[in-house]
Image: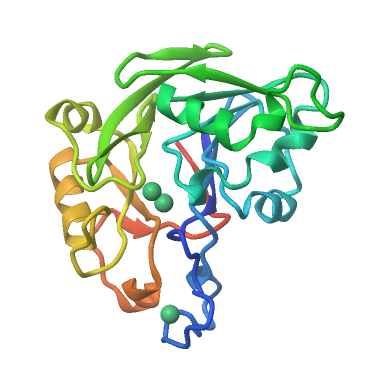
Amino acid sequence: MKVTFLGTGTSTGVPQIGCSCPTCTSPDPCDKRLRASAIVEVDGTRLLIDCGPDFRAQMLAIGAPQIDACLLTHIHYDHVGGLDDLRPFCAHKAMPIFCQPKVAKAIRERMPYCFAPNPYPGIPKIDLIEIEPYHTFQFKGIEIQPLLVMHALMPIVGFKIGNFAYITDCKTMPKETLKQLKGLDTLVINALRHEVHPSHLCLSEALEIIAKAKPRRAYLTHMAHNMGPQASVSLPEGVQFAHDFLSITI
Ligand SMILES: [Zn+2]
Ligand SMILES: [Zn+2]
Ligand SMILES: [Zn+2]
């Protein structure tokens, strides 16, 4: 299994428009963070996790490999704002998009032109497939388990595929999810900044979950500029900041 991070930043991206803080002006390319998204590749099948507003630029940057399906964590714009740019990947057949029923409903409302009886030629063909937390489903033989996490009061999902899991925009998680995260090879989890935030894990909270789950290694994602330049933050052994276009093999 190969995982490529397409973006590792929070909703504003880093640098944040108009900001001249040390992170936003850092010369380190790892401190430039597009909106959070990743591709998981298993035996030649590529699953896109989230499709944010930077999707087009992210795909061009990695040579636009074929995407076979899309998994959505939740409906926030930084996770779905690029869905219209799936067009080149669904010219011949509809793109399966796996998401919670409330996310599917919101997509139908936001992109009604995709679901019209006589759609305009060229629009993205989207096949919304509803999923529920903990109900494992399969795509091309790949087992995917949606895991419930709480984004403040909003129940959203992360995904576990084999001994890898990807969690973003989590603030708290039920015991069952923590149980499913135990003993993974690789855990990706969000860490916004140092200070506590009402709807996202801060660094110390993310590290606490990692310490309980005990994956072999963990990568942090969905960082804001006020995490500081990545080189300025020391992390425990086995934990590192992900960066855009980092590829890891599991
Ligand atoms: Zn987000
Ligand atoms: Zn800044
Ligand atoms: Zn969110």
Residue 41 shows in this picture: no
Q: Provide residue 50's location: percent of width, then percent of height.
A: 52, 40
Residue 49 in the figure: left or right of residue 209: right
- Res 193 → quadrant: bottom left
Quadrant of the drawing holding the C terminus: top left
Which percent across, then down, holds residue 82?
Answer: 63, 46
User: Whole-percent x and y of residue 170?
Assistant: 28, 45
Q: Can residue 101 be seen in this view?
A: yes
* In this rendering, position of residue 113 left or right of residue 53: right
- At x 45%, y 39%, the residue is 75
Name which quarter of the figure residue 232 lies in.
Answer: bottom left
Q: Residue at x 51, y 47 (%)?
A: 37
Q: Quadrant of ligand 2?
A: bottom left
The one nearer the camera, 6 or 130, is: 130
Figure check: 80 above or below 141: below
Q: Looking at the image, how many numbered discs can be counted on the residues?
A: 0
Vertical side of 34 occupied by 229: above or below: below
Residue at 76%, 35% (x, y): give it.
87
Q: Residue 175: image x %, image y %? A: 12, 30
Colouring rule applied to residues: rainbow
The relative height of residue 171 versus residue 158 in the rendered view (above or below) is below
Judge by depth and name the residue closer to the eye, 138 or 18: 18
For the point 72% across and 22% down, the residue is 116
Q: Residue furthest right?
A: 121
